[in-house]
Image: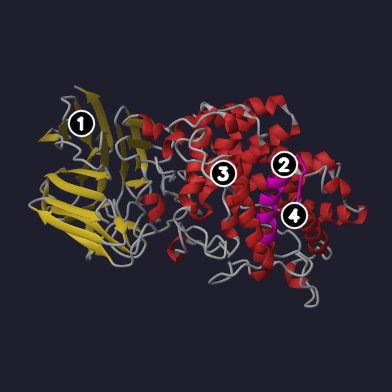
């Protein structure tokens, strides 16, 4: 990419301005051009394997997702298109919609057609990107197409109105298609019905305070921002519907109050949830708030966070030497890839360029950058709906998400723990171990393996704390009569984790693990009941047994994580006694250049129903918690 010089006067934190975003978009679009089919209807990007939907669908995905980026680039320039982007995508629209039949019925001699939208098919997802791109570029593309092409394209898009989506955020894809078709006067009644149907469906997943679940009882992740908020508020904005915009804009603003705290000072979003290969799509809800005027953030903070996350990835190898986005986090990282992901899937990152729709003289582009929440002060923020506790420290700019509410478990099935949801904590500087020892996890040890967390039952959040309960599972089945009640307390860089085990046989082994620190090199060691890991001489994690544990160790993770090829995990082990057994650890994750102070003091004592825990922090403040089976109360003392 050919980026302009930094501007540290207007952008003292990132050095980036609107011209950097335009140059980045131009670079990404230029890099995919050689992979377009002769008629421009498919873009077949290189990759290790096709998605579960097959190469034809993957080629459509390459077209649709890069078309969205091209549309934002041209619409943001008020139609200026010196690179001829819209001409190529218009040709692709023509070629791709010539034979709108199911893919299995496409003739071998038609290498360009997309195939029809079907129930729960990937073309339904891509239809939404095509429709949104056509909607924002309508004066320069759609309105200039031949009538025959418009009719065929409209018919193909309308397939999304007549078929059933996956029962999660996918309901917003027919909504997005319907919004464009209603505006274009195509199948208006069905299009408006799709909008209403999508909004009605997601309503059952809205919990309040700006948070949705994603079709499952406790599925919280970045889809809140880059899908569940983005599509409704964009539709309301583009339709000029003040009633819808007031409703969904208010929800977006509430979401951004907490969401803005999930970015580190280095621009990294918290590494949690699925589809993380979309990378800087995490900036989309920030821009949406500024675009619609529904944001708690000042314009300088919005740009600082958004530019920070784009630059974070571009500076760390998220674009290959030939300019492509691989499947991964920084570079390619296969364990992060879902079965539905194909070589072009990362280009949902195009949503992160939504800010280009704002004119160059908008305050979000002209205001001086201001620091993000993680840079201002040490904070601990409870987010009650997802059951999260967000801890950030200004000295190193790290953000840690302590998870007592998101598990992504279906309502009527038993799924194995997903490391990107089930962990006790996630951060902007670490990723879970996918192939190796479980990190940030507490479990009993059965047949040599730690139990799974399974479904998480939130028990509440408050100032400096969050708690939950679960029934540990082995082999997909809960251990009979066994329950674990967990509590996290945080202040500054420090965190205290407490786990009350009830119903287990005396002498049952337990294991707790801390942060999986990764990098090019890792150093590790133990001292008494403390395990320490340091990566690249910078990022370090400690875990100390404060009650109930008898041994500290470090487990190597030879396959590394998304943050580096070498990784290790600090670990504590112990065993249950008679009756309810309490296990307490003191940990920290830090990249601070200087020591972060003495650890907190911990005192635990048994009660009739469980244990009382008192934590005294280095500044003299304290928390007292009462833990019983499936119950936690916490107060400051």
Residue situated in front as seen by the camera: 291 or 166:
291
What is the crowding at mark 1: few (fewer than 14 residues within 10 Å), some, or many (at least 20)? some
489 relative position to 432: left or right: left
As measured in the structure, the alpha-carbon distance from the residue carrying label 3 to the one carrying label 2 is 23 Å
Q: Residue at x 26, y 29 (%)?
A: 633
Q: Find residue 226 and name its label.
A: 3
As measured in the structure, the alpha-carbon distance from the residue carrying label 4 to the one carrying label 3 is 24 Å
Label located before the other in sequence (2 or 1): 2
As measured in the structure, the alpha-carbon distance from the residue carrying label 4 to the one carrying label 2 is 12 Å
- x and y percentages locating residue 248 in the rendered image: 62, 30
Q: Are marks 3 and 1 in contact (CB under 8 Å)?
A: no
Span shown in magenta? 61-85
Residue situated in front as seen by the camera: 549 or 626:
549
Q: For residue 63: magenta?
A: yes
Residue situated in front as seen by the camera: 482 or 292:
292
Vertical placement of residue 183 versus 247, above or below: below
Residue where numbered disc 2 is placed: 77
Label located before the other in sequence (1 or 4): 4
């Amino acid at each position: 990419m050919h980026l302009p010089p930094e501007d540290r006067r207007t952008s003292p934190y990132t050095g980036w301005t609107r011209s950097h975003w335009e140059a980045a978009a131009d670079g990404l679009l230029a890099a995919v051009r050689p992979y377009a089919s002769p008629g421009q209807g498919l873009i077949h990007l290189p990759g290790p394997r096709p998605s579960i939907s097959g190469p034809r669908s993957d080629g459509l995905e390459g077209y649709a997702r890069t078309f969205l980026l091209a549309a934002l680039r041209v619409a943001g320039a008020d139609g200026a298109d010196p690179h001829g982007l819209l001409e190529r995508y218009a040709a692709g629209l023509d070629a791709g919609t010539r034979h709108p039949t199911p893919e299995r019925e496409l003739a071998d001699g038609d290498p360009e057609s997309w195939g029809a939208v079907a129930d729960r098919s990937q073309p339904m997802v891509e239809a939404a990107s095509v429709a949104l791109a056509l909607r924002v570029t309508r004066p320069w593309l759609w309105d200039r197409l031949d009538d025959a092409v418009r009719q065929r394209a409209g018919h193909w898009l309308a397939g999304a109105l007549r078929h059933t989506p996956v029962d999660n955020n996918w309901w917003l894809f027919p909504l997005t298609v319907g919004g464009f078709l209603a505006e274009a006067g195509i199948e208006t009644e069905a299009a408006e019905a799709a909008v209403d149907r999508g909004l009605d469906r997601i309503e059952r997943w809205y919990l309040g305070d700006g948070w949705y679940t994603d079709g499952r009882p406790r599925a919280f992740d970045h889809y809140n921002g880059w899908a569940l908020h983005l599509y409704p508020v964009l539709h309301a904005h583009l339709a000029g519907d003040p009633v819808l915009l007031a409703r969904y804009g208010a929800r977006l603003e509430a979401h951004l109050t907490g969401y803005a705290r999930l970015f580190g000072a280095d621009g990294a979003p918290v590494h949690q949830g699925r589809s993380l290969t979309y990378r800087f799509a995490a900036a989309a809800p920030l821009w949406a708030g500024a675009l619609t005027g529904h944001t708690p953030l000042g314009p300088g903070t919005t740009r600082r966070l958004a530019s920070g996350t784009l630059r974070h990835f571009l500076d760390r190898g998220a674009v290959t030497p030939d300019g492509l986005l691989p499947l991964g986090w920084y570079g390619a990282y296969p364990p992060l890839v879902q079965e539905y992901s194909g070589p072009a899937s990362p280009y949902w990152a195009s949503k992160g360029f939504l800010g280009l729709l704002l004119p160059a003289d908008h305050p979000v582009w002209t205001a001086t950058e201001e620091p993000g929440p993680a840079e201002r002060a040490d904070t601990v923020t409870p987010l009650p709906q997802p059951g999260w506790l967000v801890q950030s420290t200004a000295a190193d700019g790290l953000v840690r998400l302590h998870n007592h509410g998101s598990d992504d478990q279906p309502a009527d099935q038993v799924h194995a723990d997903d490391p990107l949801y089930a962990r006790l904590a996630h951060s902007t500087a670490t990723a879970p171990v996918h192939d190796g020892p479980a990190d940030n996890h507490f479990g009993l040890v059965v047949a040599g393996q730690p139990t799974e967390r399974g479904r998480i039952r939130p028990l509440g959040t408050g100032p400096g704390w969050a708690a939950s309960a679960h029934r540990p599972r082995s082999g997909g089945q809960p251990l009979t009569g066994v329950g674990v009640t967990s509590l996290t307390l945080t202040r500054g860089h420090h965190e205290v984790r407490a786990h009350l085990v009830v119903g287990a046989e005396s002498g049952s082994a337990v294991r707790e693990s801390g942060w999986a620190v990764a990098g090019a090199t890792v150093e590790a060691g133990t001292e008494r009941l403390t395990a320490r890991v340091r990566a690249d001489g910078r990022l370090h994690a400690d875990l100390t047994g404060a009650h109930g544990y008898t041994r500290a160790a470090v487990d190597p993770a030879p396959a590394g994580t998304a943050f580096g090829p070498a990784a290790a995990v600090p670990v504590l082990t112990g065993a249950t006694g008679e009756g309810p057994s309490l296990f307490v650890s003191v940990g920290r994750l830090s990249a601070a250049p200087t020591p972060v102070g003495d650890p907190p003091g911990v005192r635990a004592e048994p009660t009739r129903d469980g244990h009382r825990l008192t934590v005294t922090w280095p500044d003299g403040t304290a928390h007292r918690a009462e833990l019983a089976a499936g119950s936690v109360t916490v107060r400051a003392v």
